Image: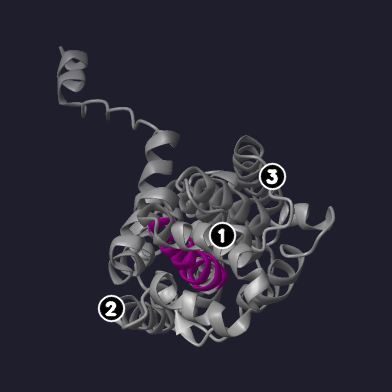
Amino acid sequence: MTQSVMSSSSPPPSPAVSEPSPFWAFWALTRFLFIRLWRIRQMGWVALGLLLLVTATVAVMTYGPIGWGIANRYSSRHKIVVSEYGTRLDQVQMTAFSPDVLGVEAAVFAAYRGIMADPHFQSDWAFLSYSRWVIFAMYLGFVLPLFTLAYASGAIGGEREGGTLIWLLTRPLPRWAVYLATFLGVLPWCLIVNGIGLLLLGLAGGEMGQRAVAAYWSTIVLGTVALASLFHLIGALFRRPAVIGLVYIFFFETLVANLPGSLKQLSLNYYVRSLLYNEAMANVTAAVPETFEVYEPTDTTTARLVLIAASLLFTGIGMVLFSRQEPVMET
């Protein structure tokens, strides 16, 4: 009787506490870091100011009297614009050539005038002109790498500077998973800001800009992922990742990617430029982008595979090294 009373008055057993799922812990950390990394860093403000300046310049050029086409280009040799070749070039020939060669020169210039008057050639020339100065020189040379550096290098570097890196490392996840979560948390921001920059330049470029966005967006995605993986690795290994990233952008990439020979194959920019060159070739029929200054561009398949492999390689190296690295706090 006493035993039954004691058993009835004893507290019920506590329910077993289930361990948190590593998958959901990883997803929660990635989502948290994505929300946390919305803030733009100092380098991002520099890139944003540069983007606004470039966008305004492109808009002035697009809607100005010259535009991106060839028709209103001034020829210093003949002292006329290209659109006047068909009506005034005969007068130039009369004063520039002797009568015995006038017939031969007229025949040569007749074909030249026909090409210049072709609407397909004019459209392709304008597209290539916009691509060369806006996409290759301005966007790929400054805007895209600076935006990517501002966000990707700050994913772990910002946590180290803010003193919250230890908090990340105390999550119930291995260090390689923390590294991967920070990369997946910051990568969407790199794609978003670079995509917005491309769209702004496309809108400022009018018809040629919209044509360029449609042709180049997939290449911009691959280039952003590859650069983000590299800058995220730099941010995890070095205490001043912005400085190292700037040296890489403005010295290594700018010089090596434009050099003849095999050394340029070490540059990510070379493969991005090769993809852009091949996309430009596929989008024109009456002009050739010879002025893009891409020395011996590689084929599309090779360039894509190299960029994908580089992204995976940099991410894998970062996961291994970050797992072995002792956290160092900023002082």
Viewer-nearest of discs 1 and 2: 1
Q: Would residue 211 be counted in the magenta stretch?
A: no
N-term mark: 1 or 2 = 2
Q: In this view, does 57 lie above or below 171?
A: below
Q: Residues within 10 Å of mark 2 (few under 14, many from 20)?
A: few
Marker disc for residue 63: 2
Residue displayed at 52% across by 57% down: 111
> Which residue corresponds to the image point at 50% horizontal and 73% vertical from the top-left?
138
Q: Mark 3 points at which residue?
A: 298
Q: Quadrant of residue 114?
A: bottom left
Report the Cα–Cα distance between label 3 and label 1: 38 Å
For the residues marked 1 and 2, what is the alpha-carbon distance in whole angstroms?
Answer: 35 Å
Which residue is at the front of the view, 98 or 215? 98
Find the magenta span and give its range: 123-141
Quarter in which the C terminus is drawn = bottom right
Q: What separation in Å lies between label 2 and label 3 (alpha carbons)? A: 35 Å
- Pick the front one: 209 or 27: 209
In the visual, does 248 lie left or right of 81?
right
Tell me which amino acid carries mark 2. Answer: Tyr
- Residue picked out by circle 1: 107
Q: Earlier in the sequence, mark 3 or mark 1?
A: 1
The foreground one among 90 and 174 is 90
The label nearer to you, 3 versus 1, is: 1
Amino acid at pointer 3: Thr
Secondary structure found at label 3: loop
Quadrant for residue 26, please give it: top left
Mark 1 secondary-structure assignment: helix
